[in-house]
C-alpha cells in the first residue's frame, strides 16, 4: 500500500488521525496532515481507507 | 429479505457518491444507478464559499473524484435528472423525464435547498449559494466590485462575507442574532467571530431583521432593516439556512419531518436508507433525533447507510457519530466536535482567546457536550476524548 497526500487540499480536520493514528498526524501550527508512514503494513489498509473516505477534503490517495 | 440486485442512489453529491463507492467496496455487483439534478460530475461544496468564490481554485478542482474513478464504479449515471417521486411499496423511483427506476434498495441523499426570503429574489443581484453554478454566478458578479450585503451570519454567510472582504469589497453582514455564528457556537465565542470580521473591515448589523429590498430597473439597490436603516447594495447574498430537499417524497409514504425520518441505522422504511444533510435519524446517544448539515457527516453517514442496506435490517449497525464541523474565515479556522450549544457553559482548556489560538469545552448538564478549537486543530483533537467519555464514536 502506498499513500500520497495533497497538502494543498488538506483542511486540517484531523479525521485521518482519528481513523489511523499510526499513519497520520497533524502539524501543530495549522493542523495540516503529516504522513508518518507513506507505506504502512497491509493490516492497516481498512483504517487507511477509512481515513481517505472520512477526509472532508479528499486529500488522501491510497494505492493498494 | 428480497434479493439485492438493483440499488438506486438519489443525490450525486458527497453522500450519494460515497454511498455508491461503499456499495461497490462492500461487494455489490448489481445494477447501481445514481441520479443527480445537476449535469456536473459530483463535486464538493465546502470550497464553494471559499476557494471557488475567491477564484483561488478553478471549478474542476472541486470535483469529488476524477472521472475515471467515477467510471470505475460502473454506475448508471443519470445526471441532469430530478427524481420526482418514490413508491417504497412498488419499489420504484420516478424521474422528471418520465423514467421509472425499479429498485431493491434505495439511498436518499438529496441534500438541502437554500431557504429564501419572502421578497427580493426576483431582483437581479440577489443570490443564494448552494451549487457550483451559484458560486460561479456570484463570483462573476463580485468581479464588478459591488457593494455586498450578506443576510445571515451562520457558517455560510460568514464565509461569504470573509471571502468577499478578501476580494477587497465593501461588505455588510446582517443577522437577527447578537453575533455571527451565535446559533452554532454561542454568542461568547460569536463575539470573537464578530471582532474578527470587524478587524477585517466588515460592517456588522447584528440583532437586525431585514424587512425589504429596494430595486431599480429590476436590479437590487438596497436592503432595508427593521430600524429603518437602508444599506445600499449592488449584490445581496441570502444565507439564512436551508431545508431538506424532500419535496419529491411528499406523497411517497416515506416518513418525513425535518428531513427523511430514519431509525438509528439510517433506515426510513424497508429497503430505503437516507444519508447526509437530508437524513434525520434517531442518534442513539444524542437523546433524540438529529440532522447534521456537515460535510464529514455526509460521507460517514453514507458509509453506514450503504453498509446497512447491504447487511439487511437484522445485521445493521446504529450510526452514533460525534459530529464534526469547521469553518475557514480569513486566517481563522474554527473546528467543532460534538454540540457547541449556545446555552452551554464554556471553559477554555488550552491557549488563550486573546491570542486567537485556543480550545474551549462546552459543558451542559454536568457533561462535556462539545469542543471548539480556534486555530488549534491538533490541540483540539487531544481534547476530543473528553466527549467520548460520554458518547461512543
Image (spheres, coloured by chain):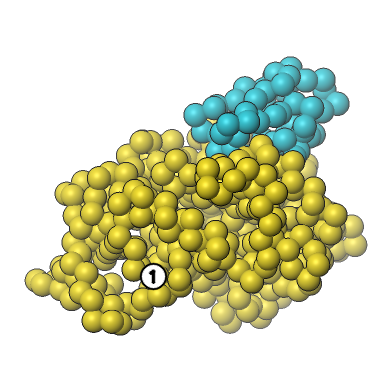
Chain colours: A cyan, B yellow
Tell which of B282 and B272 is nearer to you.
B282
Chain name for mark 1: B
Q: Specify whether residue A40 is in view.
A: yes
Count up the numbered dots: 1
Give residue B128's position: percent from left, percent from top.
35, 63
Element type at mark 1: loop
Give residue A61's position: percent from left, percent from top.
62, 28
Q: Is residue B208 left or right of residue B81?
A: left
Q: Residue at x 67, y 44 (%)?
A: B350
Tell which of B109 and B89 is nearer to you.
B109
Which residue carries the number 1 mark? B206
Q: Residue at x 78, y 54 (%)?
A: B387
Q: Specify whether residue B44 is in view.
A: no
Above or below residue B333? Residue B239 is below
Q: Is residue B31 left or right of residue B100?
A: right
Give residue B71's position: percent from left, percent from top.
56, 36
Residue B260 lies in quadrant:
bottom right
Q: Residue at x 40, y 75 (%)?
A: B207
Give residue B76's position: percent from left, percent from top.
57, 48
Above or below residue B372? Residue B179 is below
Q: Quadrant of the N terminus of chain B?
A: bottom right
Residue B4 lies in quadrant:
bottom right
Tell which of B193 and B350 is nearer to you.
B350
Most extreme residue toward the left is: B217
Amino acid at each position: 500500500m502506498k499513500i500520497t497526500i495533497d497538502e494543498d487540499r488538506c483542511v486540517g480536520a484531523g479525521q485521518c488521525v482519528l481513523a489511523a493514528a499510526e499513519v497520520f498526524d497533524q502539524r501543530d501550527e495549522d493542523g495540516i496532515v503529516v504522513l508518518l508512514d507513506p507505506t504502512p503494513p497491509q493490516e492497516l489498509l481498512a483504517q487507511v481507507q477509512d481515513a481517505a473516505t472520512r477526509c472532508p477534503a479528499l486529500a488522501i490517495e491510497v494505492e493498494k | 429479505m428480497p434479493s439485492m440486485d438493483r440499488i438506486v442512489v438519489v443525490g450525486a453529491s458527497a453522500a450519494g457518491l460515497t454511498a455508491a463507492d461503499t456499495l461497490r467496496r462492500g461487494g455489490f455487483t448489481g445494477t447501481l444507478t445514481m441520479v443527480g439534478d445537476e449535469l456536473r460530475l459530483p463535486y464538493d461544496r465546502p470550497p464553494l464559499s471559499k476557494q471557488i468564490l475567491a477564484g483561488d481554485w478553478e471549478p474542476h478542482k472541486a470535483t469529488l473524484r476524477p472521472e475515471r474513478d467515477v467510471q470505475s464504479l460502473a454506475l448508471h449515471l443519470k445526471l441532469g435528472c430530478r427524481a420526482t417521486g418514490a413508491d417504497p411499496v412498488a419499489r420504484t423511483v420516478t424521474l422528471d423525464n418520465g423514467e421509472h427506476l425499479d429498485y431493491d434498495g434505495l439511498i436518499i441523499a438529496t441534500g438541502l435547498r437554500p431557504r429564501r426570503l419572502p421578497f427580493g429574489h426576483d431582483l437581479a443581484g440577489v443570490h443564494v449559494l448552494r451549487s457550483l453554478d451559484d458560486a460561479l454566478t456570484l463570483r462573476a458578479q463580485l468581479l464588478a466590485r459591488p457593494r455586498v450585503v450578506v443576510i445571515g451570519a451562520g457558517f455560510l454567510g460568514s464565509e461569504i462575507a470573509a471571502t468577499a472582504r478578501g476580494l477587497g469589497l465593501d461588505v455588510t453582514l446582517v443577522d437577527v442574532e447578537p453575533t455571527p455564528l451565535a446559533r452554532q457556537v454561542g454568542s461568547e465565542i460569536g463575539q470573537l467571530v464578530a471582532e474578527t470580521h470587524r478587524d477585517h473591515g466588515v460592517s456588522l448589523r447584528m440583532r437586525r431583521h431585514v424587512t425589504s429590498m429596494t430595486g431599480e430597473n429590476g436590479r437590487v439597490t438596497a436592503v432595508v432593516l427593521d430600524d429603518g436603516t437602508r444599506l445600499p447594495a449592488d449584490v445581496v447574498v441570502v444565507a439564512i439556512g436551508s431545508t431538506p430537499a424532500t419535496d419529491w417524497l411528499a406523497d411517497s409514504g416515506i416518513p418525513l419531518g425535518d428531513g427523511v425520518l430514519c431509525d438509528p441505522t439510517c433506515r426510513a422504511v424497508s429497503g430505503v436508507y437516507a444519508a447526509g444533510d437530508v437524513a434525520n435519524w434517531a442518534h442513539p446517544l444524542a437523546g433524540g433525533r438529529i440532522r447534521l448539515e456537515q460535510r464529514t457527516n455526509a460521507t460517514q453517514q453514507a458509509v453506514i447507510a450503504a453498509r446497512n442496506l447491504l447487511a439487511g435490517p437484522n445485521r445493521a449497525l446504529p450510526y452514533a457519530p460525534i459530529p464534526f464541523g469547521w469553518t475557514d474565515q480569513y486566517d481563522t479556522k474554527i473546528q467543532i466536535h460534538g454540540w457547541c450549544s449556545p446555552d452551554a457553559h464554556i471553559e477554555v482548556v488550552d491557549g488563550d482567546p486573546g491570542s486567537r489560538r485556543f480550545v474551549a469545552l462546552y459543558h451542559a448538564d454536568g457533561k462535556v457536550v462539545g469542543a471548539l478549537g480556534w486555530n488549534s486543530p491538533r490541540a483540539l483533537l487531544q481534547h476530543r476524548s473528553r466527549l467520548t467519555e460520554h458518547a461512543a464514536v
